[in-house]
């Protein structure tokens, strides 16, 4: 474990935690522009977090410790996820602790905890949210895994740093397998981040909401942590997308100074990615909850087809 | 009379105690405990406070002895019981030692729990249960040690009978009796298949010892016949499709420690048997055997998990989850067979390691969850998920210990279930260059299904834990539920430790598995894994690595840091109030998702899997009611026709029985004449 490795690891975690709300703010700003509304400030998510942290937390009278600890667990999972995805550098001391499969497991752990917490208070909305979240999860999780496997087949590794290094060093060849995986990944990340065709982050209509229903009983600092964790999740997904499909510009162990270049490149890529996500959200309409399984099953099948195409062409 | 053939043992038999002697001593100890129980038939205090804990200690001893035997050379022994001239051949090699270790570890926890569990009441008295329980343990130990078909079958049958009596402990309930009958029938069918399998394997030599079977080189046809029979026989015990029907009936019917023992330990004997036959006795596996196992395993896993997700009875849910896990184990074995048929030894070792790892983690978490349901059942008297809820507040011990089991069962890092799933997916992903293109193409599909199954297992487990322990109590009486006693806690705690150890120390555990994989596929991961210390890297560090300890510490550090920083920079103020629920003040406990409600999306998505009968209310009903019954297609289309066929045949044969002596004399006469005619020719 070198000093530069430690530095890049620390920098990556701090950057993720600090920048994640900014990315959420950027996406909602782009969305507002595209929809012809006047946009909220780019720093709006930070104001919201600050406000929520200042408020006292109101807990349901019979909420168990599970309910109170779930926001911290989710926040911890998402931070760790951001720490192991190579965004600035591939020289990450924490990265060997979790490969692509463990990354998906990490998201699943957070999902299970937050769903259990939503069921803890025992209101109708909470358990409905938990059910819907798990419904999305059980289809999105294998789809994400298959997307990551498509990249793993190319790089012959499930280690995220190796994937990024291999994909970043290849000559600009087009992998049809990755194209399928890209479409699948876009669909999955819309669903997983509670974005428009599946869920609406701005909704407050009880019967249609998923993510909001899950965190309905939370307030104060717990809610702040959950909102922060949600933006960290968006950040992590964006970084997975960048790592798999646009892995150029990430610094490697041999060239620690490339980090200086990697930072503006990353910010640029995230800005473009966020704007594209806002565009996708604006162009699509929210679908009925019963259509969501079809949507995600399509993503799942596309990802599997991506793997098959890769194997077919590889021989 | 007894003599040894241990490779290292050159001393006279009496001078040195081998592992196998200690194991026999443990078996004797269990028998003694059981007999003591039978003598103290109704003295609950003696049985619960002394006999079951003694059994648990013996289980612990078995765990230790087997652990040390795992690293030793194979040992054999002869036990002069049974028919004259036909002694029991026993052999303790790495494979048996591993399964014995899992059995000892799991049974120690279960016995400790059982010490606090059994009460006097209707049905079998506690002393008799103690006898059956320990005979069950001894017979499983015998199955794992047997080295000839004769002793194997005797032990196998004893195991089936002992567990049958345990399943029917509450025999005054008709459902329990019919579940026991179904279980016995399926056990019979399986046993016949295994017997025939051994008949094929001995290849007309008349010598039924396993060492002879190992030496036989069967033609592909007979080897495949032997494999097919083994699959049928051991598949019936493991509950793979379509032989699974007994499992969701029998496991819930049994008292909870027995369910735990059956799910966590007995099912493993089926895996053991199949591994023993395919990789040890049949020396050269064919690739398509692996294909068959893969297909059967996948179908079973998907079927099991989808059915588990819609169950409304907590023990049935767990039973279906056991079916799912058996399916995953079959997938792992199938992959091992495919790889070893093509002599890809490192890959075979990887797949076999994944399988064996899952055996241990399944034994831990499934026993734990069944014990948890036992505590809930005792505290509330309810098995129906629709009448439970909110138990985390009055049963915190059971709830939090079960939570760890639930997380392990859902295959979440950093617990035991995730490691085996991770290894299995790795062996799929790095299956390079299988010579059959079809297999190479199928592998992503199989990996995708495995991922789907494990994600669905997460859904099921959230439902299981959420509906039982979280939310508001759905019945008033639940508020008085009491937490588990000391013995029950101790048993569950031991199994939780197992889940944690399997989750956090995978490298260390895989090194233990090395002798087993060396024995079965002549390759191991031990050296590779040992090189990386705390990081688990089965192939190389560049290809894949997983460090559960760092993983856990990372999450905990973020957790702690967030906790401290929030309190430092802001505050820790907290107020309790009634739930918000969007400002709806009339919410009741019945408005939470019921078990049916939580399973409804699964029912809708996987509708073709189920045979559903719905009774929907019409707008004009004065008393509308809604009912949905979910059944198994196999029951309707396979088992009921078979049962009808059997009943019809029996009725036809029954015509012969007239009940008059003259008719029977006529039969005798006719038989005599027919025999004479035959003899004369």
Image (cartoon, grey):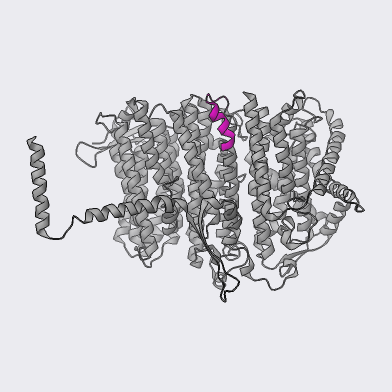
User: Residue drawn 32% across and 48% down?
Assistant: B188
Q: Quadrant of the N terminus of chain A?
A: top right
Q: Nearer the viewer, residue A315 or B236?
A: A315
Assess whether residue B604 is covered by the magenta stretch: no
Quarter of the image holding residue A79?
top right
* Span highlighted in magenta in the image: B432-446
Quarter of the image holding residue B424?
top right
User: Residue drawn 68% across and 42% down?
Assistant: A299
Q: Is residue B336 visible?
A: yes
Assess whether residue B434 is covered by the magenta stretch: yes
User: Where in the figure is residue A149, as x and y percent of width and height?
Assistant: 65, 35
User: Where in the figure is residue B205, as x and y percent of width and height?
Assistant: 25, 28
For the image, the number of numbered tags is 0
Q: Nearer the viewer, residue A120 or B614?
A: B614
Q: Is residue B264 left or right of residue B624?
A: left
User: Where in the figure is residue B506, as x and y percent of width and height?
Assistant: 57, 38
């Amino acid at each position: 474990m070198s000093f530069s490795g430690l530095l890049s690891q620390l920098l990556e975690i701090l950057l993720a935690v600090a920048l994640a709300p900014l990315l959420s703010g950027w996406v909602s700003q782009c969305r507002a522009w595209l929809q012809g509304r006047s946009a909220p400030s780019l720093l709006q998510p930070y104001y919201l977090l600050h406000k929520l942290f200042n408020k006292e937390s109101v807990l349901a009278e019979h909420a168990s410790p599970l309910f109170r600890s779930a926001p911290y667990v989710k926040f911890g999972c998402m931070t760790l996820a951001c720490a192991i995805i190579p965004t600035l550098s591939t020289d990450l001391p924490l990265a060997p602790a979790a490969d692509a499969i463990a990354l998906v497991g990490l998201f699943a752990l957070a999902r299970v905890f937050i769903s259990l917490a939503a069921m803890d208070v025992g209101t109708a909305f909470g358990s409905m949210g938990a059910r819907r979240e798990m419904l999305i999860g059980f289809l999105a999780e294998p789809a994400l895994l298959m997307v990551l496997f498509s990249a793993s087949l190319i790089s012959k590794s499930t280690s995220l740093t190796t994937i990024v290094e291999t994909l970043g060093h290849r000559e600009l060849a087009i992998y049809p397998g990755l194209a399928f995986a890209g479409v699948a990944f876009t669909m999955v990340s819309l669903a997983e981040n509670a974005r428009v065709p599946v869920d609406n982050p701005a909704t407050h209509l009880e019967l249609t909401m998923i993510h909001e229903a899950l965190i309905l009983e939370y307030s104060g600092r717990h809610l702040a942590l959950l909102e922060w964790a949600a933006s960290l999740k968006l950040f992590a997904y964006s970084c997975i997308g960048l790592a798999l499909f646009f892995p150029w510009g990430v610094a490697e162990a041999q060239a620690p100074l490339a980090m200086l270049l990697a930072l503006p490149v990353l910010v640029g890529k995230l800005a473009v990615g966020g704007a594209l996500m806002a565009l996708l959200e604006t162009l699509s309409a929210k679908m009925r909850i019963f259509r969501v399984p079809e949507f995600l099953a399509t993503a799942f099948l596309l990802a599997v087809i991506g793997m098959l195409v890769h194997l077919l062409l590889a021989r | 009379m007894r003599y040894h053939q241990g490779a290292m043992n050159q001393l006279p038999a009496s001078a040195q105690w081998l592992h196998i002697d200690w194991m026999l001593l443990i078996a004797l100890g269990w028998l003694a405990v059981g007999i003591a129980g039978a003598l103290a038939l109704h003295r609950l205090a003696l049985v619960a406070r002394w006999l079951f804990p003694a059994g648990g200690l013996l289980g612990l001893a078995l765990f230790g002895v087997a652990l040390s035997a795992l690293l030793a050379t194979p040992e054999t022994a002869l036990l002069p019981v049974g028919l004259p001239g036909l002694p029991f051949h026993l052999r303790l090699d790495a494979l048996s030692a591993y399964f014995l270790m899992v059995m000892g570890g799991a049974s120690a926890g279960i016995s400790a729990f059982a010490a606090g569990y059994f009460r006097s009441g209707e049905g079998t008295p506690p002393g008799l249960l103690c006898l059956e329980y320990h005979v069950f343990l001894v017979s499983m130990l015998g199955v794992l040690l047997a080295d000839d078909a004769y002793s194997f079958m005797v032990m196998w049958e004893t195991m089936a009978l002992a567990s049958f009596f345990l399943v029917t402990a509450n025999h005054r309930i008709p459902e329990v009796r019919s579940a026991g009958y179904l279980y016995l029938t399926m056990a019979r069918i399986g046993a016949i298949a295994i017997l025939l399998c051994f008949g094929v394997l001995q290849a007309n030599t008349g010598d039924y010892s396993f060492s002879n079977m190992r030496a036989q080189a069967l033609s592909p046809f007979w080897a495949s016949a032997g494999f097919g029979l083994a699959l049928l026989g051991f598949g019936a015990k493991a509950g793979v499709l379509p032989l699974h029907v007994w499992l969701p009936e029998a496991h819930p019917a049994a008292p909870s420690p027995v369910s735990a023992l059956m799910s966590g330990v007995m099912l493993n004997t089926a895996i053991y048997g199949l591994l023993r036959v395919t990789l040890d006795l049949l020396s050269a596996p064919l690739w398509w055997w692996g294909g068959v196992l893969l297909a059967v395993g996948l179908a079973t896993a998907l079927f099991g998990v989808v059915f588990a997700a819609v169950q409304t009875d907590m023990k049935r849910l767990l039973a279906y989850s056991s079916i799912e896990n058996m399916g995953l184990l079959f997938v792992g074995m199938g992959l091992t067979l495919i790889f070893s048929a093509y002599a890809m030894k490192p890959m075979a070792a990887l797949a076999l390691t994944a399988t064996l790892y899952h055996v241990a983690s399944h034994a831990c978490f499934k026993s734990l969850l069944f014990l948890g349901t036992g505590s809930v059942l005792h505290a509330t008297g309810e098995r129906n998920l629709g009448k439970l809820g909110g138990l985390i507040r009055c049963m915190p011990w059971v709830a939090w210990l079960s939570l760890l089991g639930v997380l392990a069962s859902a295959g979440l890092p950093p617990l035991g279930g995730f490691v085996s799933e991770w290894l299995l997916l790795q062996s799929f992903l790095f299956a390079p260059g299988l010579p059959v293109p079809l297999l190479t193409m199928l592998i992503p599909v199989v990996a995708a299904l495995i991922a789907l199954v494990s994600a669905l297992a997460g859904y099921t487990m959230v439902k299981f834990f959420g509906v039982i322990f979280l939310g508001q109590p759905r019945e008033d009486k639940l508020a008085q539920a009491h937490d588990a006693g000391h013995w029950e806690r101790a048993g569950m705690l031991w199994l939780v430790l197992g889940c944690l150890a399997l989750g956090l120390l995978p490298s260390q555990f895989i090194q233990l598995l090395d002798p087993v994989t060396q024995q079965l596929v002549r390759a191991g991961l031990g050296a590779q894994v040992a090189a990386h210390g705390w990081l688990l890297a089965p192939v190389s560090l560049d290809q894949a690595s997983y460090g559960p300890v760092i993983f856990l510490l990372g999450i905990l550090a973020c957790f702690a840091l967030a906790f401290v920083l929030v309190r430092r920079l802001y505050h820790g103020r907290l107020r309790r109030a009634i739930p918000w629920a969007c400002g709806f003040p009339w919410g009741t406990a019945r408005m939470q998702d019921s078990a049916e409600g939580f399973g409804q999306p699964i029912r809708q998505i996987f509708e073709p899997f189920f045979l559903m009968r719905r009774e929907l209310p019409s707008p004009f009903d004065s008393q509308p009611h809604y009912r949905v019954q979910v059944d198994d297609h196999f029951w309707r289309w396979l088992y009921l026709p078979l049962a009808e066929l059997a009943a019809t045949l029996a009725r036809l044969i029954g015509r012969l029985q007239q009940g008059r002596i003259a008719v029977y004399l006529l039969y005798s006469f006719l038989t005599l004449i027919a025999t004479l005619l035959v003899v004369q020719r």
